[in-house]
Amino acid sequence: MKIDGLDRLISQLQTAGDGGLKAEYQDWLEDMGLQFLDIIQDELIKENAVDTGRLLRSFTQGDKENHFLISKGGLTLEVGTQLEYASYVNDGHATSSSGERRWVPGRWTGSRFEYDPNASTGMMLASQWIDGNGYWDHAVMLYEQMFEQSLDRKLQSWFDRHFGR
């Protein structure tokens, strides 16, 4: 018995298994990481979580020391930040873990407080809970939807190129 195209299918699957598909998906995953960085930045801006821009600029791709990583289906995307307070902005936090009041030296410039350890003026902070804005959680939800659709399109495109329709 002879099946038309079977030799071609076996050859293409062998190529995929030898790294052709893996290399293609690695490039695609890197592009998806860049898109995820854009989503994170959009969410930070949407949630008004931009003050100095430090958190906004801190997110990078490919650093195993980042506080946030995504792993799904055997693929790992290292996108995140090394800023410890990024999780506080997302999850919320108490201004004092012991519940006591503390003095912060500095000065007010308009409605903005500027920390200055040498200032004779400042403000007294009482412990309170600051709600998080969930920027990371929102970004992950949006990204997962986009990721699944893009993965399906990528796989179908690869299949169409190698096996024709």
Image (cartoon, grey):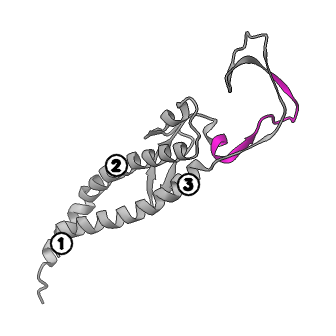
The number of numbered discs placed on residues in the rendered structure image is 3
Nearer-the-camera pick, 125 or 20 = 125
Distance CA(mark 3)–CA(mark 2)? 20 Å
In the rendered structure, the answer to whether residue 161 lies left or right of residue 111 reads left
Q: Over which residues does the magenta segment extend?
A: 88-103
Q: Position of residue 3 (x, y in %)?
A: 13, 85
Of the residues tagged 3 and 2, which is closer to the observer? Answer: 3
**Residue 93 visible in image:** yes
Would you name the residue on which mark 3 appears? 138
Would you name the residue on which mark 2 appears? 31
Would you name the residue on which mark 1 appears? 163
Instruction: Tell me which amino acid carries mark 1.
Output: Phe
Instruction: Tell me which amino acid carries mark 3.
Output: His
Secondary structure of the residue carrying numbered label 3:
helix
The single residue placed furthest to the front in the displayed view is 110
Looking at marks 1 and 2 on the same chain, the residue that comes earlier in the sequence is marked by 2
Q: Is residue 59 magenta?
A: no
Q: Position of residue 22 (x, y in %)?
A: 30, 56
At x 68%, y 27%, the residue is 111
Q: Residues within 10 Å of mark 1 (few under 14, many from 20)?
A: few
Instruction: Tell me which amino acid carries mark 2.
Output: Asp
